Image: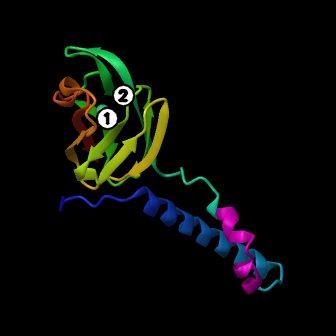
Amino acid sequence: MDNTQPLSSRRVAVGIGSLLGGVALSAAAVIGVAAGVGAVWHATNPSVAPAAAATPASSGGASLTLTIKMASTPGGEAPVYVGSNGVGAPILATLTAGVPTSVTIVNKSPMPHTFTSAALGVNETIPPGPSTVHFTVKATKTGLVSWDCEVPCGSWVMSHAGYMTGELKVVS
Ligand SMILES: [Cu+2]
C-alpha cells in the first residue's frame, strides 16, 4: 500500500478541468488585451470557465475496456472478467505506470460484481448487467498488482486466477 499513490477519478477530473479552465482563462486574457478590452472582465465572465470545464478530459491518457460475461469454465458456467488477453488469462490487462487510465467495465452477466484492487486504491461496485461502469486509475509503480471481485458470484471463478481474480501488469 505504501508504494502506490492511487489517484481517484474525481481528482483527475478536477485536475484536468482546472488545467483546461486555466488555459482558457489565460487565452481569454490575451485576447482581451489584444482587443483592448479589460482582461479582468474576461476572467470573471462566467461564460468562459464552464465552457472549458465541459471539454472532455480524454487527451493524454489511456483507456481500457473490460467485459464481464457468462462463460464455460473448468468449474462450470459462470461469470468471468475478460480483458485483452481473453478468457482465463491470469493477467487481465496491462497498464502504463504514471498514465491515468480510463477504465470501462461492461457487465453482461445478470449478477453484481466488484472490481477491487487494494494496490490501485480501487473498489468499484458493478451493478447487475446489463450495466457499464467508468472510473480512472493511475498506477505509480511497475510490476504485477492483484485484483478480484468481492461479490460471491461463483466459488470456482473466485478462487482461480484469470476469472474473478488475477493480476494486472503495470509497465513503464
Ligand atoms: Cu464477480
Give the answer, above or below, for where 62 lies relative to 16: above
User: Residue 46: which disc?
Assistant: none
Residue 90: image location, x then y, percent: 21, 29
Point 82% across, 83% down: residue: 37
Point 28% across, 51% down: residue: 120
Task: Evaluate whether residue 101 shows in this view.
Answer: no
Residue 74 found in image quarter? top left
Q: Between residues 115 and 98, which one lies in front from this camera angle?
A: 115
Task: Evaluate whether residue 5 shows in this view.
Answer: yes
Residue 94: image location, x then y, percent: 31, 38
Residue 125 found in image quarter? top left
The type of residue carrying mark 1 is: Ala
Q: Is residue 116 magenta?
A: no
Q: Range of the magenta residues?
A: 39-52
How many numbered tags mark residues here?
Answer: 2
User: Residue 84: which disc?
Assistant: 2
Point 72% across, 70% down: residue: 48
Q: Which residue is mark 1?
A: 93
Residue 4: image location, x then y, percent: 23, 58
Is 106 left, or right, of 151 in this rendering?
Answer: right
Pointers 2 and 1 in contact (C-beta within 8 Å): yes
Give the answer, above or below, for where 25 lies relative to 69: below
Mark 2: which secondary structure? loop
Point 36% across, 59% down: residue: 7
Mark 1: which secondary structure? strand
